[in-house]
Image (tube, rainbow, N blue to C red):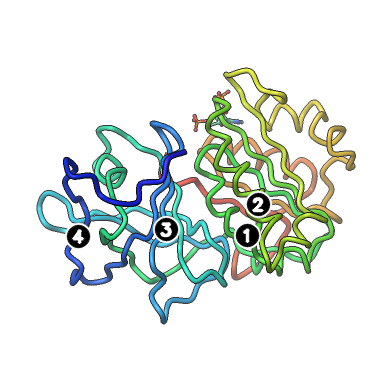
Amino acid sequence: MTETGISSSNSISVGVPADTKDSVKVLSVTHWNDRLFHFTVERPSSFRFRSGEFVMIGLLGDNGKPLLRAYSIAAPFWSETLAFYSIKVQDGPLTSKLQNIKVGDHIIMKTKPVGTLVLDALIPGKRLYMIATGTGIAPFASLIRDPEVYEQFEDVILTHTCRDADELAYGAWLIEQAKSDELIGELASEKLRYYPTTTREQSPKMGRITTLIENGELFSDLQVPAFNADDDRVMICGSMGLNTDVKALLEAAGLEEGANSKPATYVLEKAFVG
Ligand code: A2P
């Protein structure tokens, strides 16, 4: 990964003017590879959110109007700064520009957090699974650093499946951060388990998470029983296909979809960008 601290002289700023409505200042930018990056921004002093929620962020489009997309906040509710994880789409209206932001630039962030990947949408249980593919790991970057997760569950499992091994780097870094965190490091070290898999490039564990659930490898690897509605709570965040397929497996095991207004045993959200 490379940290881009200071704008290089040959790069043009893509941020919005600092006095733009709802603007927030970029504090750091980390490029993981040519397809993925994450960045942190200042947290507006009055902004409150629940771990796992998302907000609309963006830049000004060519027509001068805000060009906004939904992004999960990849930082816990208590964090002094906010974070976002993004793909870089070379011809994407927003991410083709957003990938060039530099420290000190400003972006737009609407301060209305929403989402269903929140503890409030789940009833109490023993084990919490967070199942992510690709950039769908972003809301879990928030939740794995929320002490409430460890107060409510005795076993916390984060699965992350990507095509290639280098796409797992951000997740591995997050786990390290969580386990060495001053506030939740001890809890995370004791309760958080990480289960990374790849589907196209060789890595120690290969296969779609759906396959590993169906053939039982996920459970035997983790030495836990198969999904059951009494003990297991599940949060899913990935592509539409992933969400639909995991949902079917969970419902076959007797789990029910929850919402803020009606907590139940699993919740899902589409990974917005990518
Ligand atoms: P695969 O390589 O077999 O398609 P994407 O980059 O397309 O969003 O995919 C991210 C990861 O999610 C890939 O490892 C991909 O596996 C996996 N994936 C995509 N769709 C599904 C699905 N319906 N069920 C399980 N895994 C999926």
Tell which quarter ligand 1 is in: top right
* Figure quadrant of residue 50: bottom right
Closest to the observer: 212 or 20?
20
* Figure quadrant of residue 212: top right
Q: Residue at x 24, y 55 (%)?
A: 59
The residue mark sitting in front, 2 or 3, is: 3
Confirm or deny contact between disc 1 and disc 2 (CB under 8 A).
yes
Disc 1 residue type (three-letter): Leu
Q: Which mark is residue 40?
A: 3
Horizontal relation, residue 273 to residue 144: left or right: left
Horizontal relation, residue 259 to residue 16: left or right: right
Mark 4 or 1, nearer chain start? 4
**Callout 3: SS:** strand
Mark 2 or 3, nearer chain start? 3
In space, the residues marked 4 and 3 are separated at their CA atoms by 16 Å
Mark 1 or 2, nearer chain start? 1
Q: Which residue is mark 4?
A: 16
Horizontal relation, residue 228 to residue 113: left or right: right
Confirm or deny contact between disc 4 and disc 3 (CB under 8 A).
no
Q: Which mark is residue 154?
A: none
Q: Which mark is residue 143?
A: 1
Disc 4 residue type (three-letter): Val
The residue mark sitting in front, 3 or 1, is: 3
**Callout 4: SS:** loop
Q: Which residue is mark 2?
A: 235
Closest to the observer: 40 or 46?
40
